[in-house]
Image (cartoon, rainbow, N blue to C red):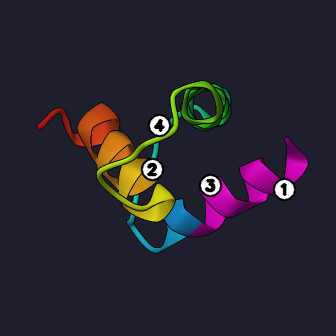
Amino acid sequence: MAKLRKLNERAKARNEIQADLDPGLVFDTMSAIMLYALIFQPTAESWEAYVRRTLHLFFKGS
């Protein structure tokens, strides 16, 4: 979790994410995406595309 906090701080400093983004939310979201993908493996796209699409939908809302 400490590495994730450090990653979040660097992203905040570069204005890549909102300043008030909760690192716990990011950790929980990534964990859920990975667990879901392990159970229901994506077949129509690569793992990278799946994770990127899912994160985009989650954080951007469209």
Q: Are marks 3 and 2 in contact (CB under 8 Å)?
A: no
Question: How far separated are the C-alphas under marks 1 and 3?
Answer: 9 Å
| Labelled disc at residue 8 | 3
**In the image, which disc is placed on residue 51?**
2
Type of amino acid at the residue the image marks with label 3: Asn
The earlier-in-sequence mark between 3 and 2 is: 3
- 9 part of magenta stretch: yes
Look at the image and give the residue range highlighted in magenta: 1-10
Label 1 vs label 4, nearer the camera: 1
Q: Position of residue 34 (x, y in %)?
A: 62, 37
Where residue 2 sits: x, y (%)?
88, 48
Residue 61, disc? none
Circle 3 residues within 10 Å: few <14, some 14–19, many ≥20: many
Q: Which residue is mark 4?
A: 20
The earlier-in-sequence mark between 3 and 4 is: 3
Residue that mark 1 sits on: 3
Q: What element does badge 4 sit on? A: loop
* Mark 3 or mark 4, whichever is nearer to me: 3
Q: Nearer the viewer, mark 2 or mark 4?
A: 2
Label 2 vs label 1, nearer the camera: 2
